[in-house]
Image: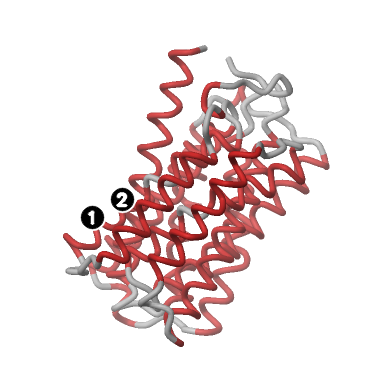
Amino acid sequence: MGDQRFVFLFQGLFVVFVWSASKIIMKMGLEIIPPYIFAAAIQVVALLGIGVYYLFKDKAKRITPTKEEIYLMILGGLVAFAGAKIFSIIGLQYVTGATAGLIAASVTVFAVIIAALVLKERPKLWQYGGILLVLAGTYVFLSNDIIAGSLFGILLLLVAEMAFAFNNVIVRLLARRPEDIALLTNLVGNIVGTIILVPLGLLVDGVPAKIWTWPVVALVVVVGLIFAFSGLLWAQILDKLRVLEVSILSNTMIIQVAILSVIFLNEAMTWHNIAGGLLVLVGALVTDQHVIIKKDPRFKYG
């Protein structure tokens, strides 16, 4: 399983990279498209993409979920595909891209806490120290940016990251099943997200004419497909690795989004950003120390 685990780790790094890129694309899109209809449009594309893939998937490998599994899938759809998505898109309007990447890395803290409560993956002493470093780094990073507008965005993004961390645990619980349930989990989650976000988007923003221009359509399609298939790949990773194992991968988003923000959004990095980002990264590494090479006997690894 050793080599296979590294395959999943590299797969996770790729997913985090496309998520980093999607944050930059969404920041650019929010200058053109109102947030609620933007979230709805992205969700529709994601559902279409994952739906078409499901239809052409080998029917012999399809599974019939239990009632408990269906409830978990619906809960994941409410939390991550609807709630986290809309909080994330609205929050992006009020913060820089680099700040969004830093907050996304806070998933380590939430993952440790939720995994301890739900999966009984108890934190070690060094993990509490790592969490303190993450919090200290976050404070340093944001020390010059906490003003009325950005604070609102920061709070929304923190709620979104808590929701994503909680959904990681839900997917991990579903992974107890011997069969691969990742595709069905994402299909149900996207259906739930679409049912909620489309009426909300139409009610709040309507359908602006500029959404039908080719540049905007292309932007929505790209982000929608990123959400559809990166979500599927991430679920497959959580089917093989522990929640704390994959949380370290999310922390690379600090560096990725910061670099992409400088290149594409012309954002400037201050020493507060650099020092705080490094502290968060070190804290995340400390939090995840040794977890990456351990196995959880309750789950399958092959």
Q: Is residue 137 left or right of residue 111?
A: left
Q: Viewer-proximal residue, 77 or 168? A: 168
Q: Viewer-proximal residue, 50 or 161? A: 161
Image-quadrant location for residue 150: bottom left
Q: Check contact, mark 2 vs mark 1: CB within 8 A.
A: yes
Q: Residue, x 54% and y 27% (percent of image)? A: 290
The image shows residue 230 at horizontal and vertical percentages of 43, 43
Residue indicated by mark 2: 255
The relative height of residue 25 versus residue 173 in the rendered view (above or below) is below
In what quadrant of the picture does the C terminus appear?
Answer: top right
Q: Amino acid at mark 1?
A: Ile
Q: Is residue 170 left or right of residue 253?
A: right
The image shows residue 24 at horizontal and vertical percentages of 30, 61
Q: Residue furthest bottom?
A: 148
Q: Viewer-proximal residue, 161 or 36? A: 161
Q: Residue, x 69% and y 42% (percent of image)? A: 115
Q: Residue, x 83% and y 42% (percent of image)? A: 67
Q: Secondary structure at mark 2?
A: helix
Q: Secondary structure at mark 1?
A: helix
The relative height of residue 158 versus residue 169 in the rendered view (above or below) is below
Residue indicated by mark 1: 259
The relative height of residue 161 versus residue 86 in the rendered view (above or below) is above
The image shows residue 108 at horizontal and vertical percentages of 54, 48
Q: Amino acid at mark 2?
A: Ile
Q: CA distance from mark 2 to mark 1?
A: 6 Å
Q: Which mark is residue 150?
A: none
Image-quadrant location for residue 211: bottom left
